[in-house]
Amino acid sequence: MWCYEKRLQFPVKITKTCPKTAQLIISQYGGPDGELSASMRYLAQRYSMPVKSVGGLLTDIGTEELAHMEIICAMVYQLTKNLTTEQAKEAGFDAYYVDHTTGLWPQAAAGVPFTALEFQSKGDAIADLTEDLAAEQKARTVYDNLLRVITDPEVREPLKFLRTREIVHFQRFGEALENTKEHLDSKNFYYFNPEFDKQFLQK
Amino acid sequence: MENKNLAIASVPIQQWERLYDENTALLNGTVFPCLNMPFYAAESAAETPLGSAISALPQSENLSSGNEQTQLLLQIMTVSFVLDDLRLYMDTHPADTAPADIKKELVTKRKQLLSQFAQNHYPLTPDCEGCWQEGPMPWEGVCC
């Protein structure tokens, strides 16, 4: 069960219309390393996790990623809410405009639609947690790249906040992997699949 | 490093440390100073890390001034964020007793703030008093 709270996790107040910036940061909504992908990845992986606390962590981070998706969407919305068609044409935002006007639709910066092919739920705790570590790093790189090309401080501050969250989440997934290892055979972590061969799992 | 760590990723377990205050935590994206690792390559001269994050934040003047509604909402945001960050730490450090007391205190504070905000302005959660339709939508940039 989820419960909505009518506020953003980090405040967003952008006063300047900029469709170009919107087109870039929309990648963190519907792109391969975006917040929607992150949330769905973690919330999908948690069910079969062999260590209860790791399932709990995936729930908490998956939930936080939904709040991050809302921050990104709020930014795209504010960057385009007073958009004119001239501004859309000048910024190359006209293709998006034709299909979605100024509505929110999950896509990557280059226009590729959101797809579940961009994340994995492998049913193997080591494989999934290693993917999660990589996912946080990839998302951090996207924020690094966005911070290089965006100068407006009203846009940069939420992006910096979100970037730090990727680093915190990486640390937590690393700790979750350490925790999972404690339940495995330390001489051979690949002796069995802890999500499938449950009889071998150390309690 | 021992042989048992071959062919698998390893990340050191974070140790407990003195936390940032609530405002600094939200502005930096974490309550833990050891996890605050800014991207210096993309910081402009006008934007020296940490200290300037506060001055560059468009709504930062409202951290100390601003109207009562803004103040209250910001307080809810900062307290809630510290709880968000502590929750993840507690997920991976179940034996640590240090965060439990802070959590207890902040949960009480958050409840009071949410109830006060609902009474004076509009409800932020479905279980607060008042009509869910009251107040602006959060993506409208109203907070501050």
Image (tube, grey):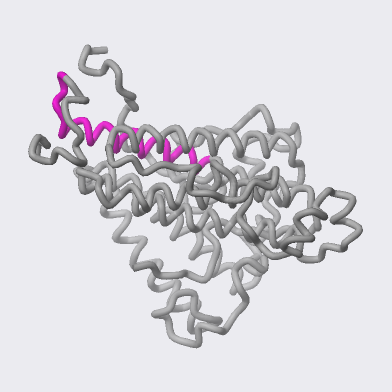
Residue B79 percent location from the top left of the image:
44, 59
Q: Is residue A156 visible?
A: no
Left or right: residue A138 compared with residue A20 = left
B38 vs B10, nearest the viewer:
B10
Looking at the rendering, the stretch of residues picked out in magenta corresponds to A164-187
Q: Residue at x 88, y 56 (%)?
A: A87
Q: Nearer the viewer, residue A146 or A9?
A: A146
Report the front residue among B61 and B81.
B81
Determine the residue positioned at 25% across, 45% down. A49
Residue A7 image-quadrant placement:
bottom right
Q: Residue B83 appears in which quarter of the rendering?
A: bottom left
Residue pictured at 56% horizontal, 48% vertical: B27
Q: Quadrant of the N terminus of chain A?
A: bottom left
Q: Is residue A60 visible?
A: yes
Q: Position of residue A162 (x, y in %)?
A: 55, 46
Above-or-below relation of A197 to A10: above
Image quadrant holding the C terminus of chain A, namely top left
Residue under the image location 29 percent in, 38 percent down = A176
| B82 lies above or below A194 | below
The rendered magenta stretch, by its main secondary structure, is classed as: helix
Residue A3 as seen in the image, left or right of residue A11: left
Q: Is residue A169 magenta?
A: yes
Q: Decide whether residue B26 is among the magenta residues.
A: no
Which percent across, then down, holds residue A43?
37, 53
Q: Position of residue A28 (x, y in %)?
A: 60, 47
Q: How many marks?
A: 0
In the figure, is residue B79 to the left or right of A79? Answer: left
